Image: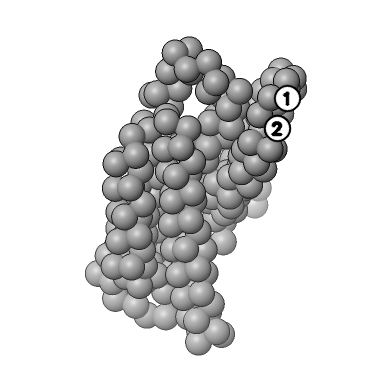
Amino acid sequence: MTVVEYWRWWVVHLWVEGFFEVFATVVIAYLFARLKVINAENAAYASLLSGAIYLSGGIIGTLHHLYFAGTPTVALAFGSVFSALEIVPLVFVGYEAFDNIRHSKVRPWLAQYKWVVYFFVAVAFWNLVGAGIFGFMINPPIALYYMQGLNTTAVHAHGALYGVYGTLGLGLLLFCMRAMQPERKWNTKLIGFAFWVFAIGAAAFVWFALKLMLTKGESNSPDIQRVEA
């Protein structure tokens, strides 16, 4: 089982956490640059930084998964740090885009891509929260020994997989549909409603999962067990 898990985590980290991070950063940076909501040079820098982190840190970042194989603590620590760095380029891209959305009032044509931009900004947000904060919460060596398999793992997985790549898929679909018929008038209220339903639903999952974990943790505390006995 140790050998199987060892190689499984190499696949998971180098493919999912490595390639997917680079793909998400590059495609969003490119589309944001085309929509002129971020500077083209900054988009190029973010893409190159993301690729460099993947190529240099993807192997080291995998080490934070190998806590079960007797991996030294210093290797786990280096792995958690390099893994956390993978989210940085996309967060910068999303922040700049969100800061520049107000320019849509200056560029009327950008208004029809407003909710496309919002979906992509949501990708950067969940990349920070789901993949970053909740991922790093279970990445340090002490957490890997005691927190793997709890609801924190499901929160990280859901926030990163749906929050980042589910939202990215919806944003790309919306962008393609908008670009195919740019002259068509859309009911943006329905799109806005759908956006907030997805966002609130993802946040609710994270909240209830953490709440359930804390509730179970309290019910399993030694004091309560003694009272029940």
Q: Callout 2: 10 Å neighbours few (<14), some, many (20+)?
A: few
Residue bearing mark 1: 184
Image coordinates for residue 20, horizontal then vertical, percent: 50, 59
Residue lying at 39% horizontally and 49% vertically, measured from the top left = 87
Residue in front for this viewpoint, 155 or 61: 61
Q: Give the answer, above or below, for where 113 lies relative to 69.
A: above
Residue in front for this viewpoint, 102 or 229: 102
Would residue 165 be found to the left or right of residue 13 on screen? Answer: right
Image coordinates for residue 37, horizontal then vertical, percent: 42, 29
> What amino acid type is highlighted by mark number 2?
Gln
Image coordinates for residue 214, horizontal then vertical, percent: 56, 42
Residue lying at 45% horizontally and 70% vertically, measured from the top left = 14
Image coordinates for residue 174, horizontal then vertical, percent: 66, 37
Residue bearing mark 2: 181
Q: Give the answer, above or below, for where 104 lies relative to 36.
A: above
Residue lying at 35% horizontally and 72% vertically, measured from the top left = 59
The alpha-carbon separation of the residues under discs 2 and 1 comes to 6 Å
Question: Where, quadrant-wise, is the N terminus in this rendering?
Answer: bottom right
Residue in front for this viewpoint, 74 or 18: 18
> What amino acid type is highlighted by mark number 1?
Arg
Would residue 206 be found to the left or right of residue 101 on screen? Answer: right
Q: Which quarter of the picture shows residue 224?
A: top right
Q: Which quarter of the picture shows residue 144?
A: bottom left
Residue lying at 51% horizontally and 74% vertically, measured from the top left = 11
The answer to whether residue 170 shows anywhere in this view is no
* Total residue callouts: 2
Would residue 109 be found to the left or right of residue 173 on screen? Answer: left
Would residue 123 be found to the left or right of residue 175 on screen? Answer: left
The answer to whether residue 199 shows anywhere in this view is yes
Does dot 1 land on a helix, a strand or a loop? loop
Q: Give the answer, above or below, for where 209 lies relative to 74.
A: above
Label pair 2/1, CB-CB below 8 angstroms: yes
